[in-house]
Structure formats: C-alpha cells, structure tokens
Image: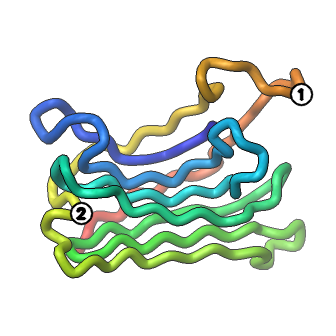
Amino acid sequence: MFGFFNYPPADVGPDTTNEIDIEFARWGNQSYQPLNYTVWPARKGIKAAHQTFAFKAGVAKSRHRFTWKEDRVIYHSVVIKDNGSAGQEAYWAFKPKAYKQAISSTPMPIFFNLWGFRGRPPADGENVEVIINTFKFTPAQ
C-alpha cells in the first residue's frame, strides 16, 4: 500500500477524521480497484466519502493531486506516457452539501507512506519501490 495524505495531529481530531487520501491499495482483495480517493469527515459520526478507480500496475510515471477547498476536494490522477503525453486519467470532485462537517478546514501536514497491508510482504515476493520525483504544495489563494 502506498499513500499520501494529510493527517490530523491529536489536537485536531482522532484517527478516521480530518483526512484527505490518495492511496494505491487493493486492501487484500485482488478484485478491488487499486486507486483510492478518500475524504474522512471533519468530525466522528459522519461516513467517509470514497471513490476507487482502475489504475494500471507497473506504471513508470504518473501524477496525482488533490485540491482541498473549504467546500470541496477535487482529485486528479494521470499516467504520463514515455513521450511525456497524458495517458489514462482519473478524476473525482467531492462536493457535499454539508461541507463543514464533511471536509476539514484545519491546516495539516502531508505524509507519504509505503507499507504491507496487515504487515504482510508482497504476495509475489518482489521488492516494492516508489520514487517521488517532485512534490509541490500550493497554498490556497
């Protein structure tokens, strides 16, 4: 599983709140689509919003982003072909009516992680590598 996401420190909220994720995981089920976009709500008791997409394994280059605004979170992923052009894309705009409860408004750091689901190594026994060539944070205007 590889992901990048914001995550709340203890003074912001408990686990499963205030989080915006892009994760690559099948969560132990090979039939699941591997690209996961998730918005964990600003407070407990509200269901997380989640969307999954097929995303080709073994892609050499891809670009992923989320744009976090007060009333929406917009996700976009694209495969970068060998010639530099755009390939397969995924897009989701989460725009809830009750956005103040559904989307955190508290600034939080971004984290990256790579781990084996349930602590297990890859089923094929191969090493796993993720290379991040560029990371860019652009504050809201």
Q: Position of residue 25 (x, y in %)?
A: 64, 44
- In depth, the one of 123 and 78 nearer the eye is 123
With 63 as the anchor, is 80 left or right in this view? right
State whether residue 3 is above or below residue 103. Answer: above
The residue that label 1 is drawn on is 124
Q: Position of residue 131 (x, y in %)?
A: 69, 41
- In depth, the one of 49 and 7 nearer the eye is 49
Q: CA distance from mark 2 to mark 1?
A: 38 Å
The local crowd at label 2, few if under 14, some if 14 to 19, many if 20 or more residues have their Cα within 10 Å, is: many
User: Quarter of the image holding residue 69?
Assistant: bottom left
User: Quarter of the image holding residue 96?
Assistant: bottom left
The local crowd at label 1, few if under 14, some if 14 to 19, many if 20 or more residues have their Cα within 10 Å, is: few
Mark 2 vs 1, N-terminal side: 2
Quadrant, the N terminus: top right
Instruction: Name the colour scheme.
Output: rainbow
Q: State the residue at coordinates (82%, 25%).
A: 127
Amino acid on which the number 2 mark rests in the picture: Ile
Q: Which mark is residue 103?
A: 2
